[in-house]
Image (spheres, coloured by chain):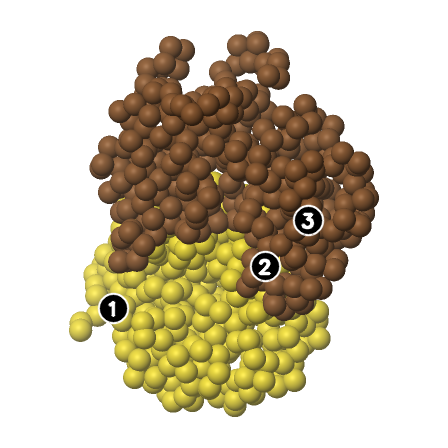
Chain colours: A brown, B yellow
């Protein structure tokens, strides 16, 4: 386990927030604290057949997903159940959203069920913050529009830290559809804040304006962006954005921005390849690279996702569980 | 209706930006008209109101509102509004224009802008000649620009024949189609769909060139960027008959105001960078921008309490227009008579209204205000929906009395 951050040793509260809405609100040592907390859950999850800890017993966790998701929803459900929470999932198809209820009415309805934690994914940037202002329990952002996806960035950081032993000083290239990516925004803020040298690599049509303000360097030439990289993180390119709107075609995209063996040879010899999934093989990444367990951390990312989410669920509910020092 | 009792407003600083009059004097109103300014004793049958220490000016002509709400207007010292055609349904029929013109009477006179195209869809010309006969003082493209340059060219050419001002929204339509913010660091951090600020300059350059080619009168309702102002000044220097307006929001707020997804700061066009805000202030000071309006466009709680991109654009502006405008005077950017020109005579002249002046026989539309009275903007106190990005802001300048057609309709 990494050493505690000096600020924590000096007495800073490790997590003074009611909600987890984004990386932007977190101090570097609060991020380090969450990653440290996640280590124990990574161990527990690997320990054997029994992976149970009862600390959230009796607490109700609602996973309200207003946008389709399989992996993230499953990850939050498993994380909650391993900690003993009563986990309920609300999917788009089962929600009142389709019946014209406003988001805030839905939030107030959920709140009236007296949950102890709400995990929310929504297609609109800022929607999770809006809900957090109207409910009485901790809210965890599982992805809002193009804004943030903090647990994804945390699980990526945990994966990198475990594989590389550190984050500071690493060259991390994040490549693909950055314009529409909440994963990229959260990772920029987290990794740059932990001292990594972060690069944003994308065709010019998929790079947001002033992205450098988030502490990264922008590249539109993938070969240059990958040079010497210790970590290459590929982003998914949505199908509807491939056919002419932002890039001319799938094959042209793969030719210039796909991760191939030849291109990866420009990175550091011990490069770590990551992808938040689900992958488009042959569009943004060569399937053989994704499957190479020596270099690819794709499945480990999924595994660390459960651990990081267990840590977040635990930390966010400490105040209401009356854990000493969290009152 | 009988004419109200004659009124004598005594002891105030009477400013008429149309004539240049600015002195402490008595303003005498009779038969719903201005009957004199001077030092003479008011006749015995007149009601005398002491307005010592206050400013007496023509009622505000608010050129560019989406909602005509008489109580909010009266509280803001506004006696006439130029109404955008974005009503429900849009003002694309002469009968709808005639109906809109009667909406606010007697306390608020509404001067409608007819929809430039059917349903404001930007494709087919609406019956703007008939709309003029029904009372339209101009035609407008509404909340959006007309995307098709050929439609815009024909609109300007046609409107010229009827001597109607064409009021445009200056945002290049395709670039701004899905955008809810101005491209830049704030939009990138928040993950909001954004359009470049130069989308405004593209629209202004195109429309000014088309106005030059057709000889039409063009009014750009809001100019909010440095590049947009540059394009405007080029056209004005070439003699194009183009005027421009702005609202206080773009003079006092930049795009940082949307941080934290504050949907009250969701406006159209979106708030700009600090550099663009400064340029807009400069454009107002040098006269490139000649009209200050409220853009009054209040939205319900349900329409505003939404994720930022889904919230409706617009703010309540009528009751803060004068106070925020007076901020420009306090900041030394404008003299008080200059500010009043932007609020009264300039919009009245542009839209051909007999208003915005205290000359003899002008309509007795008057605002009396205390330029220094401090207050705190509180949307809950507004008449009607109170969503404003200025909520909680301490300001100064209060309307003490609004007189419409010789009758006192607001007094505090």
Q: Is residue B230 visible?
A: no
Residue B316 sits in quarter: bottom left
* Front disc: 2 or 3: 3
Q: In the image, what residue occupies the spot 30% across and 58% down?
A: A98
Residue B115 sits in quarter: bottom left
- Report in which chain the residue with disc 1 lies: B
In the displayed structure, would residue B177 be above or below residue A154?
below
Instruction: Tell me if B81 is positioned left or right of A4 in this view.
Output: left
Marked residue nearer the N-terminal end (1 or 2): 1
Residue A27 sits in quarter: top right
- Report in which chain the residue with disc 2 lies: B
**Element assignment for label 1:** loop
In the displayed structure, would residue B327 be above or below residue A324?
below
In front here: B236 or A25?
A25
Task: List the residue tagged with mark 2.
Answer: B195
Instruction: Tell me if B340 is positioned left or right of A174 in this view.
Output: left
Q: In the image, what residue occupies the spot 52% across and 14% down?
A: A12
Q: Residue B361: horizontal and vertical position, in percent?
A: 37, 72
Asked if badge 2 and badge 3 are on a common chain, one would say no
CA separation in Å, label 2 and label 3: 39 Å
Number of marks = 3
Task: List the residue tagged with mark 3.
Answer: A288
Q: Which label belongs to residue B106?
A: 1
In the displayed structure, would residue B126 be above or below residue B389?
below
**Element assignment for label 3:** helix
Q: In the image, what residue occupies the spot 46% across and 68% down?
A: B143
In front here: A321 or B261?
A321
């Amino acid at each position: 386990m990494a050493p505690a951050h000096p600020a924590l040793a000096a007495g800073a509260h490790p997590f003074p927030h009611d909600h987890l809405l984004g990386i932007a609100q977190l101090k570097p040592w609060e991020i380090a604290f969450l990653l440290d907390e996640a280590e124990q859950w990574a161990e527990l999850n690997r320990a054997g057949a029994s992976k149970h800890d009862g600390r959230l017993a009796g607490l109700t966790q609602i996973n309200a997903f207003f946008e389709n998701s399989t992996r993230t929803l499953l990850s939050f459900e498993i994380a909650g159940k391993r900690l003993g929470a009563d986990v309920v999932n609300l999917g788009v198809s089962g929600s009142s959203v389709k019946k014209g209820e406003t988001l805030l009415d839905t939030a107030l309805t959920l709140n009236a069920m007296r949950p102890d934690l709400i995990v929310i994914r929504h297609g609109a940037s800022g929607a999770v913050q809006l809900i957090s202002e109207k409910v009485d329990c901790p809210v965890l952002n599982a992805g809002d529009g193009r804004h943030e996806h903090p647990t994804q960035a945390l699980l990526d950081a945990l994966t990198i830290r475990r594989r590389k032993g550190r984050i500071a000083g690493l060259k991390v290239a994040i490549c693909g559809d950055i314009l529409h990516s909440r994963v990229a925004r959260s990772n920029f803020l987290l990794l740059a804040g932990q001292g990594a040298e972060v690069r944003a690599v994308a065709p010019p049509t998929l790079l947001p304006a002033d992205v450098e303000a988030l502490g990264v360097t922008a590249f539109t030439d993938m070969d240059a962006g990958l040079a010497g990289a210790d970590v290459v993180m590929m982003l998914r390119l949505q199908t509807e954005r491939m056919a002419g709107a932002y890039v001319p075609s799938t094959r042209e995209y793969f030719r210039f921005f796909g991760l191939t063996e030849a291109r990866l040879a420009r990175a550091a010899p011990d490069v770590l390849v990551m992808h938040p999934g689900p992958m488009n093989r042959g569009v943004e990444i060569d399937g053989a690279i994704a499957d190479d367990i020596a270099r690819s951390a794709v499945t480990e990312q999924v595994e660390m996702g459960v651990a990081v989410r267990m840590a977040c669920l635990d930390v966010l509910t400490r105040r209401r569980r009356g854990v000493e020092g969290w009152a | 209706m009988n004419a109200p009792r004659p009124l004598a407003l005594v002891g105030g600083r009477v400013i008429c930006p149309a004539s240049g009059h600015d002195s402490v004097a008595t303003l005498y109103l009779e038969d719903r008209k201005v009957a004199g300014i001077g030092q003479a004793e008011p006749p015995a049958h007149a009601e005398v109101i002491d307005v010592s220490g206050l400013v007496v000016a023509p009622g505000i002509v608010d050129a560019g509102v989406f909602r005509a709400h008489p109580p909010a207007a009266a509280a803001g010292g506004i006696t006439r509004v130029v109404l955008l055609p974005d009503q429900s349904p849009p003002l694309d029929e002469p009968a709808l224009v005639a109906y809109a013109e009667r909406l606010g009477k007697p306390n608020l006179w509404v001067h409608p802008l007819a929809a430039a195209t059917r349903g404001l869809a930007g494709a087919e010309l609406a019956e703007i000649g008939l709309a003029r006969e029904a009372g339209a003082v101009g035609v407008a493209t509404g909340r959006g620009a007309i995307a098709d340059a050929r439609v815009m060219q024909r609109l300007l050419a046609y409107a010229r024949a009827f001597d109607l001002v064409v009021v445009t929204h200056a945002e290049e339509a395709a670039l701004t189609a899905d955008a809810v913010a101005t491209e830049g660091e704030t939009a990138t951090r928040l993950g909001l769909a954004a359009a470049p600020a130069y989308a405004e300059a593209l629209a202004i350059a195109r429309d000014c060139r088309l106005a030059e080619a057709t000889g039409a009168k063009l009014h750009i309702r809001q100019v909010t960027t440095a590049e947009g102002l540059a394009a405007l000044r080029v056209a004005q220097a070439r003699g194009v008959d183009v005027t421009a307006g702005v609202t206080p929001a773009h003079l006092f707020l930049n795009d940082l105001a949307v941080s934290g997804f504050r949907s009250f700061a969701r406006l159209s066009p979106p708030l700009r960078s600090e550099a663009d805000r400064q340029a807009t202030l400069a454009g107002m000071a040098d006269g490139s921008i000649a009209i200050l309006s409220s853009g009054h466009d209040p939205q319900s709680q349900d329409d505003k309490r939404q994720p930022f991109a889904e919230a409706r654009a617009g703010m309540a502006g009528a009751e803060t227009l004068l106070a925020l405008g007076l901020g420009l005077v306090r900041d030394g950017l404008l003299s008080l008579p200059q500010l009043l020109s932007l609020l009264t005579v300039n919009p009245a002249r542009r839209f051909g209204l007999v208003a915005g002046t205290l000359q003899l026989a002008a309509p007795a539309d008057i605002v009396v205000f205390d330029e220094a009275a401090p207050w705190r903007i509180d949307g809950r106190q507004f008449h009607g929906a109170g969503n404003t990005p200025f909520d909680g802001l301490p300001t100064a300048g209060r309307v003490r009395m609004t007189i419409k057609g010789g009758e006192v309709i607001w007094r505090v």
